[in-house]
Amino acid sequence: MRLCHAGVMSAVLNWLISVQGWPWIMTTEPSSQYRACESQQAQKQAKRKVLYLHWASSREEDVSDLLDDWQVIRVGSVQEARAAMQDDPLRVVLVRFGELDHERKLAFEQLVEASPPLYWIALLDADSIEQDGFSQLIYDYFFDYYTLPLTDKVPFLSAALGHAYGLGALCDAEHEQRRYREECQMVGASPAIRLVFSQIRKVAGVDATVLITGNSGTGKELIAQAIHQRSHRHKGPFVALNCGALPENLVQAELFGHEKGAFTGAHCRKVGRIEAATGGTLFLDEIGDLPLSLQVNLLRFLQEETIERLGGHETLYIDARVIAATHRALENEIKEGAFREDLYYRLNVLSIEVPDLKEREGDIELLANFFFRKFTEGKHYKVRGFSRRATAAMNRHDWPGNVREMINRVRKAIVMSDNRLITAADLGLDNAGGGEAVPTLEQARNQAERQAIRRSLKKTDHNVSSAARLLGVSRVTLYRLMEKHRLHAAGKN
């Protein structure tokens, strides 16, 4: 039998008093340490609570008598269930269904909507699952279900309750960490995005330029903000400029600023984005779209850390970190003469490649729920979450628009849905995985090649020779395939 330390000491003292006759040793109240130990043991022995909503007219054996390891809080109506949820912190609810008519189905849905996040387990008659609407209700709302009579199913029911209770405990423990991650909008648990998180932590502490690459909509600006927030410049400004969103004749003035009278319409001095980022971070999005004529000016700033406003003669020293991002393959742009090679190497001191959403296995549901909470928090929308079929459709979808596409689909579904749970049709994904065209063999082969190359490069820290050995091809062949799939090796050979 395991005893806490305070308990052992108390036993020894009592033995000394009774056997050895030590008159100067007196019994006292248990120490605070001993009381704390007893309290911990009592908590471990306390039964877990489960709310039992008995919603049937039948008089079968009371489930409360079968679940010896649980403190069953039995209620007979939705109103009593709501009151019980307010009185006790609960994680699991057991519902005994009888007949399911429209009124009762509506009352249950309203109960779920008004409740905190809970795990629901259903008990129902064997023939009830065939009723119209019952199977859909179970599918949309319940963690598990069992048909009556229970007889030899009680151990399985108890295990399911324990599993659900444990998941609820994990959710509680993760709440604070999840809230912090969501405040930074960096959500994900897949190996691909965890690698990005690791790279963010590494580059944040080094005051050097960073090049973030990835397809449109993958969240490159969020990664730049995360680097800034974790760097020693976090108290300084974060200034962003989309190099592809402005006409060529305005980009220079936006970047470097201008003096009064520098050109027609310059009625006063204007501070440029570079100067505004002093002490902080300058984020240049879509750097591949920066006009070639201005690339030399940006290169000079990166080399000298000085600028001159347009129309001015004063040389200004600027202490700002530069983070650039692009969806283009800059190596190809260099070969085509559209991007300066020297500027590329100045920008690509440190690099992060952002994976597509379809490559982030397991993150789709996390992101969808995050954006749902973000868009509905503090607002009175009818919808309360995603149906299971909607979640399955999202996991099947290819997400060509990446995270940006998900934001648009979720936001639209929240506003336009007439359902309490967002459906696949609300998301515009009712044909996902069903009506879409089957890829050709060449498309499937290309996708497999690209994934294999990316994984081998990541595994070898972008060492091309080692990656080629892993893939069983020559270094020349790997370079050819990398060129074909527009992949790069982060400057390493």
Image (cartoon, rainbow, N blue to C red):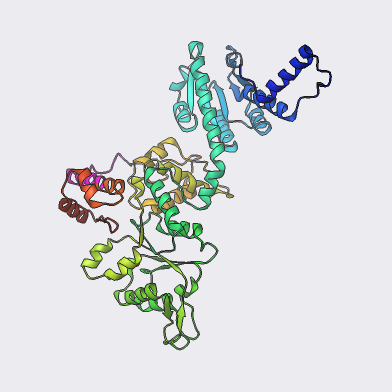
User: Percent position (x, y) of residue 146?
Assistant: 48, 20
User: Percent position (x, y) of residue 148?
Assistant: 50, 15
Place residue 289 in its image quadrant: bottom left
Give 115 or 262, whichever is nearer the viewer: 262
For the point 75% across and 27% down, which residue is it? 31
For the point 56% across and 24% down, which residue is it? 94
Place residue 42 in its image quadrant: top right
Give 278 or 100, whichever is nearer the viewer: 278
Above or below 80: residue 174: below
For the stretch drawn in magenta, what is the main secondary structure? helix
**Residue 444 in view of the camera:** no
User: Percent position (x, y) of residue 482?
Assistant: 22, 53
For the point 42% across and 44% down, which residue is it? 426
Above or below 169: residue 269: below
Give 10 or 474, whichever is nearer the viewer: 10
Q: Is 438 in the magenta? A: yes
Q: Could you tell me which quadrant the C terminus lies in?
A: bottom left
Image mark count = 0
For the point 81% across and 21% down, which residue is it? 27
Above or below 121: residue 187: below
**Residue 41 in view of the camera:** yes
Q: Which residues are magenta?
A: 433-452
User: Percent position (x, y) of residue 296?
Assistant: 32, 76
Q: Is 120 in the magenta? A: no
